[in-house]
Image: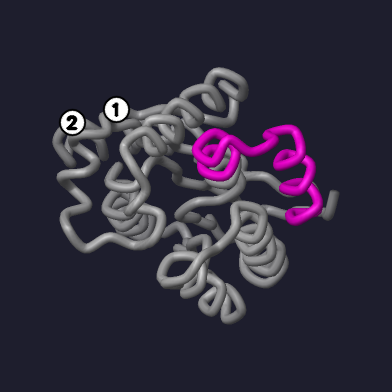
Amino acid sequence: MENRKNGLFISFEGIDGCGKTTQIELLKKYLDEKKYETIVTLEPGGCEIGKNLREILLFHKGYVSDIAEMFLYLADRAQHIQEIVLKNINEGRIVLCDRCIDSTVAYQGYGRKGNIEQINLLNKIATNGIEPDLTIVFDVDIETAQKRIGNTKDRMEKEGIEFHKRVREGYLELAKKYPKRIKVINSNQEIEKVFSDLKSIIDEII
């Protein structure tokens, strides 16, 4: 595993429509006010190569095989970890990342019914063994999530209800498997209550 210094790596996960992007923005403001140096990034698309991969992954109109999809996400992650995440951690910043390793397990593993053991191995290769210090899963029921997404949907958001149910189940399974790293917040609540729960977890780790 590559050396890491000083900084903190926090990832945010959940099914589409869980509200994590809003919570990341609120947390960034909160940490800035406390004088922590933070950076917000995302997968896919957190680096230049990733922006092109994001366009393919979320907006390509043609067929994308499940295996190709998985490797495109992994390629984005490999570049992103090296170019953005490690650099900022080593410079002492708190990295707030919208999706990371657990998304691939939840979506391509549980959602697409892929080989989770293989995905875990490939994730380790792509990240050189780096994983978040803390992962927050915003858990929301499927009906609420679908209402939040609305009618304009990307390629992943257009997947059927059963797919998103499997993804949600995947996240909850991961939280049971890695309770020290992954914390679950009920995202069916009002934005202010969700953020209050998030602050409580963040305050403990910083």
Q: Secondary structure at mark 1?
A: strand
Whole-percent x, y for residue 206 in the image: 50, 40
Q: Is residue 192 left or right of residue 106?
A: left
Identify the residue at image location x=41%, y=70%. 59
- Graded by Cα atoms within 10 Å as few (under 14), some (14 to 19) or many (20 or more), the crowding at tag 1 reads some
**Residues in magenta, as a range:** 106-128
Task: Say which residue label 1 marks.
Answer: 186
Mark 2 in CB contact with mark 1 (< 8 angstroms): yes
Q: Quadrant of residue 176?
A: top right
Extreme residue toward the right, this view:
1
In this orientation, does residue 34 appear? Answer: no
Residue at image point 38% right, 41% down:
15
Q: Which amino acid is tagged 2? A: Gln
| Snapshot quadrant of residue 202 | top left
| Secondary structure mostly seen in the magenta stretch | helix
Asked whether 1 falls inside the magenta stretch, the response is no
Please, what secondary structure does the residue beneath circle 2 have? loop
For the question of whether residue 63 can be seen, the reply is: yes
Count of number-bearing discs: 2
Determine the residue located farthest toward the front in the rendered image: 63
The amino acid sitting under disc 1 is Asn
Camera-side residue: 23 or 200? Answer: 23
User: Residue 189's mark?
Assistant: 2
Residue lying at 29% horizontally and 27% vertically, measured from the top left: 186
| Labelled disc at residue 118 | none
Q: Position of residue 42 (x, y in %)?
A: 48, 62
Residue 105: x and y, percent?
Answer: 60, 39
Note whether 148 is above or below 68 in the view shown.
above
